[in-house]
Amino acid sequence: MRAKDIANIEKRLVDATAQKDTATMIECYRRAAAIYEATGDENSAAFFFTNAYVFALEAGSPHANELRGKLIALGRI
Amino acid sequence: MNNPGIFDHEAVNRVLQPVEKANGLPNAHYIDPTIFEAEKKPIFFDNWAGIGFAKDLPEKGYAKPLTFLGQPLLLVRDRLGTVRVFHNICRHRGMILVEDAGAIRGALRCPYHSWCYDLDGALKATPHVGGPGHNAHEAIDRDTLGLIEVRSHIWRDVIFINLSGEAEPFEIANGELIKRWAEFETPIFHGGPESSFKLRIKTNWKLAVENYCESYHLPWIHPGLNSYSRLEDHYNIEEAGKLSGQGTLVYRQLTGENGEQFADGPGLSSKWDKAAEYITAFPNVMLGVHRDHSFAIVLEPVSTGETLEHIEIYYHDKSSLSQNLEALRCKNAELWKRVFEEDIFVVEGMQRGRHASKFDGGRFSPVMDSPTHLFHHWVAGKIAQAA
């Protein structure tokens, strides 16, 4: 189930990147990070939180602070 | 390139003679691409060069990339409203950061590896720099890797930069000009889209300045202006080593069909009732002031034989921007555009003439061309210092 969710997210990411749909990209990276966070896979969670974070920074998104907090909590800032 | 050995110093020294004896700069300074490159540092990068206008950053958070003499630059109005100039590159691998002008909603993100910068230049994020999911590394000190800021100064809405960082402060380097026009140190208001235009001319940028320096050509090139502002109504403006230009004693305010005029700037002395002045802030910003409006021309040296003139007109009272004066603003812009277009064939003609191999750089009328010689002398002096 998790693998299927990740595959769907990755497909949405490819489309969103092609369309420069930053909001969707942030959402996709956040969802992927949450899935890995829930399973305790810190490295993968940190990877996806990082990608969500930089696009949130660029967009001036309100999610930027929350994502920064996640990375700090993981010791990955 | 810093290669002072490339210049013909014997010819440059002839420029440094008194105006009665001097020759102009040699042909190579107008037609040789190698000299064009060699002039960049002593003429532009070591001094205060004009590169654009603050009005092109219309709101906080706006960024505009541009290239000036090959240098990729980024104009930014930060979140506090301060205009800054940075090198438009990421500190990681030198990738160009911003391709298109526009509002920056958040941070500047490098498209290559997503390093992110605040608009004050601070490096905010270095994603995966320590490995996937590891966003820091002890070898990468973000505090030392912010955007490279270029020393800048805004005057009369013109953005000036000193790339070398070593020039005197702007207020000192251009102190005489600022003092001369102290009465115009009041807010100016850009006239809008109709007050902004560009002219691409097939000439070396220096010829545009040389032509701007003098009124000698008025009767032959600007017959319309000359009809009410004759040679004898003009005077030379010269501060050796600093600035030169010309003034007129008979400025005539533009009047609309119904007698409307632009309002004067506040607090001007009676000198400016009829006077107007036209001075170049060396090396490349040509300025004109009148009681009711002013303009700035930033010369962008595209190549040794091509220059792009960026021309902006400003008004000295906000009332001049009103809807009912739009037609008058258009008329004013058209008049100036016509005047500047009248100069095109002579500056382009001089550029073509510089290919005459026996031309010695020319001579100067000690009475009529002294501001022009002063500019040649300034350029020659900078080149001599570079040796």
Image (spheres, rainbow, N blue to C red):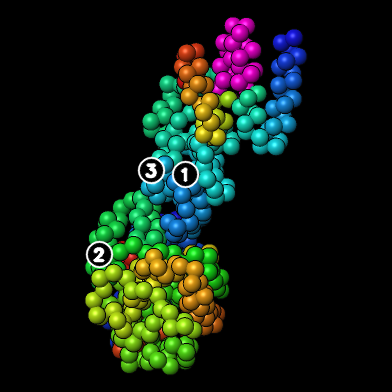
Return the residue nearer the eye: B268 or B361.
Answer: B268
Between marks 2 and 3, how big is the CA–CA gap? Answer: 28 Å
Q: Going from the N terminus, do you reach mark 2 or mark 3 first?
A: 3
Compare residues B335 and B87 and report the one nearer the observer. B335
Q: Is B302 contained in the magenta span?
A: no
For disc 3, the neighbor class at 10 Å (few under 14, some 14 to 19, many from 20) is: few
For image coordinates 38% across by 89% down, the residue present is B229
Q: Which mark is residue B61?
A: 1
Q: How many marks?
A: 3
Residue A50 in magenta stretch: yes
Q: For this view, does B285 lie left or right of residue B97? A: left
Both marks 1 and 2 on one chain: yes
Name the chain letter of the residue that bears numbered label 2: B
Q: Chain of mark 1?
A: B
Circle 2: element type: helix
Circle 1 residues within 10 Å: few <14, some 14–19, many ≥20: many
Tag 1: amino acid: Gly
Mark 1 residue element: loop
Image position, residue B226 (x, y; %): 42, 91
Q: Which mark is residue B80?
A: 3
Q: Is residue B24 visible?
A: no
Residue B114: x %, y % from top left: 55, 32
Is there CB contact under 8 Å for labels 1 and 2? Answer: no
Question: Which residue is identified by label 2?
Answer: B175
Q: Upstream in the sequence, badge 3 or badge 1?
A: 1
User: In the rendered structure, which segment of residues is drawn in magenta?
Assistant: A29-51
Locate the C terminus of chain B by quadrant: bottom left
Using the image, name the chain to which the residue with label 3 belongs. Answer: B
User: Does residue B218 appear in the picture of this structure?
Assistant: yes
Q: Of the residues shown, which amino acid type is indicated by label 2? A: Gly
Q: CA distance from mark 3 to mark 1?
A: 9 Å
